[in-house]
Amino acid sequence: MRKLLVQLDSSRLPSVFDRVVAYDAGADAVMSYGAITEADVRDLIHGCIFTRGPNDLKNTAVFIGGADMAAGERLLAAAKQAFFGPFTVSVMLDSNGSNTTAVAAVAKMVQAAGGGGDVRGKRVLIVAGTGPVGIRAAGLFARAGAEVVITSRKADAGERARDLVLQRFGGTVRATTMRDASEAAPACERAALLLNAGPAGVTLVPKQAWANRPGLEVVADVNAVPPLGVEGVDVMDDGVVKHGVRCFGALAIGNLKMKVHKACIVRLFERNDLVLDAETIADVARELSAKPQ
């Protein structure tokens, strides 16, 4: 029986990236729908769950994407609401690649941190953490017991991001204002791990803010477009030690992101009741990391 992936995208044009990855991960066909709203979801889900017998439903799965993570979360909620009894299919949420990117960054950083990957009680600074990747990463670190600090150019945006993290993940999270790169050094004080989640092509963390900083163990940057977000961290850095700090660049993080993304697509077709969101995608990443290379 063919493995069918139904791509529900909140953006007008369904993501070509997500579709290509789905095929590369083993989907036999991808049915892509764009500009999807909550009102559209029920009937589309019914088309998934009423067309195959219960034992065959694992061969149909749903991927929710789009540029807007908040919209994706609403689509996921609507999809789960349309399920009932044994009439379910597996579903994955990865709007704008936010879940898989955040999971990959956090996995690499936690693995590289001192104390055998235990980040409990450590301060984690998420620079420009008000976007979907930053919020997801902040939540995953908070769930792991870290003391998370989100920076934002505007105080109100930082507070909103903090509230979203606390509502979704819990933990210890606060927000601080960092208007530009000139304020990076004081923001880095007492940080053990630093993740730049800022916009492409903007340097937010100068080298002098992080290099040889006492207590700082790991720095990571998800910005792959020059100028890079963390000065001195190259896109291919994959755990290299620079100025006393272990560094991870955007492409090194992206390589793991792709492996996680593909592994998740494979998982969707193994059962018909799997929901892959930040936490469960993180579980997949940990399983991949535990396997010998």
Image: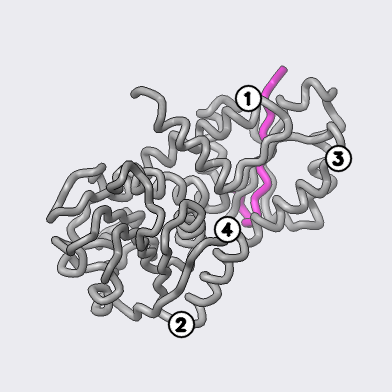
x and y percentages locating residue 133 in the rendered image: 47, 57
Q: Residue 28 got which mark?
A: 1
Q: Quadrant of the N terminus?
A: top right
Q: Residue 169 got which mark?
A: 4
- Read off the residue under disc 2: 155
Per the rendered image, the range of residues in magenta is 1-14
Residue 106 is at least partly visible in this image: yes
Labels in figure, total? 4
CA–CA distance between discs 2 and 1? Answer: 47 Å
Look at 31% across and 78% down and name the residue there: 180
Residue 31 is at least partly visible in this image: no
Sequence-earlier tag: 3 or 1? 1
Sequence-earlier tag: 1 or 4? 1
* Left or right of residue 81, residue 186 in this image: left
- Kind of residue at badge 4: Phe
Question: Which structural element holds mark 2?
Answer: helix
